[in-house]
Amino acid sequence: MTYDEFKNSLNEQTAPETLSPALKALWTDGAGDWEAAHTVIQDHQDGDGAWVHAYLHRKEGDASNARYWYKRADKPIFEGALEAEWESITRALLETQS
């Protein structure tokens, strides 16, 4: 799936079934439901899951918890706009899913 296809799928009622848990959480957040996105990723604590978890806690405004998850993901703390981070993570995870 390309990034543009992923973005366009946000107009659908449900996430594409082929998405990894991390991408499903990003899809859910992109569709406007932070709480459900956090629920999706809660039990997926691998590197990708930790990275998405970090982003979600940063978006929530919980910088301390976000730092913990960035460290678990072995990723630097993102300093830019939340939209840019969402896109960056989504693109990276789509590349690895292909």
Image (cartoon, helix red, strand yellow):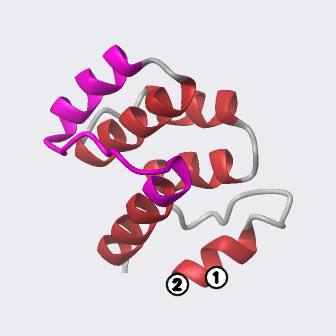
Which amino acid type corresponds to the residue marked 1 in the rendered image? Answer: Glu
Q: Circle 1 is placed at which residue position?
A: 5
**Residue at 16% from the left image edge and 31% from the top image edge:** 71
Q: Is residue 60 left or right of residue 22?
A: right
Q: Which residue is mark 2?
A: 2
The secondary structure making up most of the magenta span is helix
Q: SS of the residue at dot 1?
A: helix
Along the viewing direction, whichever of 5 and 20 lies nearer the viewer: 5
**Residue 14 x, y percent position in the rendering:** 78, 57
Locate the C terminus and report the quarter of the image it occupies. bottom left
> Where does the image place residue 42, in percent across and percent down from the top left?
46, 26
Residue 50 placement (x, y as % from top left)? 31, 36
**Towards the viewer: 18 or 89:** 89
Residue 66 appears in the rendering:
yes
First to last magenta residue range: 63-85
Q: Residue at x 37, y 65 (%)?
A: 93
